[in-house]
Amino acid sequence: MRTARVWRRLLGVEQTVIESVELVEERGEEVVVARVRPVRARRSRCSRCERRCRGYDGGDGRRRWRTLDLGTTKAFVEADAPRVACPEHGVVVADVPWARPGARSTRGFEDTCAWLAAHAAFTVVAALLRVSWRTVAGVVTRVVADLAGRTDQLAGLRRIGIDEIAHRRGHRYLTVVVDHDTGRLVWAGKGRDSDTVRRFFDTLGAERSAQLTHVSADGAEWIHTVVAERAPQAVACLDPFHVVAWATKALDAVRRGMWNEPRGAGKTAQAETLKGSRWALIKNPDDLTRPQRTTLAGIAKTNQGLYRAWLLKEQLRAVFATKGDEGRQLLAGWLAWAKRSRLPAFVKLAKTIERYRDLIWNTLEHGLSNARSEATNTHLRVLTRRAYGYHSPEALIAMAMLTRGGLCPDLPGRPA
Ligand SMILES: [Zn+2]
């Protein structure tokens, strides 16, 4: 019947026979239920390998899968969910053409949900699709696993950055690997220790590890040791944004020290200016608002120590923007300046930077692009802070791969 084609199209299902479509009253709400079955060629297949297998039993009987709303009305497809006996995977639920194995909603619904999760706030996704946050997290995990199984995330890697990301308020960590050339997150794993880094190199394999030319990190020994062991040919670098972050921290230490000082001496007004100065000092000069510029100008006049600290931070940023030999010369000048700055936080930072000088020289020499990996890094940090209603590292990794790993599905029903 021709209406069957219309319904297949509306429900976003393929290789499916529509048996009937009805409005059904459910918990005080009318919903559309389409009773369906797979076309003959798609019946009795293993949901893991799609191989045709012997039927086993009726499983749990009829099941419903949520599909995209039809206008204002919730819609479901309903079908038998028999089990089959696969020679390789044992007794499993038979594959259905409209949904991923283990899913409670159709592919079209899941792809829409995952796409939205990557592009809108979770509260928006949950309200629009009428699902819980937990459901969204489960959908994202399944969709990402499905897409990851179909592409090689680690193909063609040459220059990578390895980093750690704290989550659960800094109690847990993920180790993440970013491709410097594309800015894409290519791998994420639980933990931050050398075993986690080894797991990445195990997945990458010896042949592809040998193709790596540059590996950047934040100077952490547990990363650099494993890189030396598994990819000894790769040039070790230090990610510039980590170095600039160290300088920002030193600047903040100087600012806090000075804020406490005048307050103690009863100079309340000056203390208040300093208290409000944090963002004026930390932001890149180009991003400053007009009041922040005024604050900074005020600091230059009244507080030379703090202004010197700010200049030191900016100068260090300039080193990495310059690169090459000139960058090296700037760095040498910076070190000399920081050491005699009479600002303990910067004297200490100068020592740290000297310790990592070889790695920093490598970074300057190879002009390792920073903007993309920094953007990815910033994005991941924001991700860990958003209240997603999920807590497992697996869900966080899936969300990261969805938004930064290129594993976001297309919206269904639109030509590519
Ligand atoms: Zn199978």
Image (cartoon, rainbow, N blue to C red):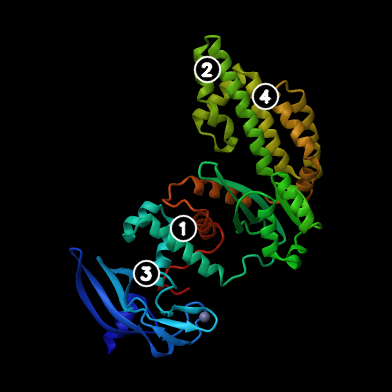
- Separation of residues labelled 1 and 4 (CA atoms): 42 Å
Q: Nearer the viewer, mark 3 or mark 2?
A: 3
In the picture, the disc for residue 308 is 4
Dot 1 surroundings within 10 Å: few (below 14), some, or many (20 or more)? many
What's the mark number on residue 271? Answer: 2
Residue at 47%, 51% (x, y): give it.
391
Report how far apart the C-alphas of labels 1 and 2 lie in the structure.
Answer: 42 Å
Question: Which residue matches tag 3?
Answer: 105
Q: Which residue is label 1 attached to?
A: 118
Badge 1 marks a residue whose secondary structure is helix
Per the image, label 4 sits on a secondary structure element best described as helix
Residue 57 seen in the current view? yes
Q: CA distance from mark 3 to mark 2?
A: 57 Å
197 sits to left or right of 293: right
Along the viewing direction, whichever of 162 and 60 lies nearer the viewer:
60
Q: Is residue 366 above or below residue 28?
A: above
Q: Earlier in the sequence, mark 1 or mark 4?
A: 1
Residue 330 appears anywhere in the view: no
Q: Position of residue 152 (x, y in %)?
A: 62, 69
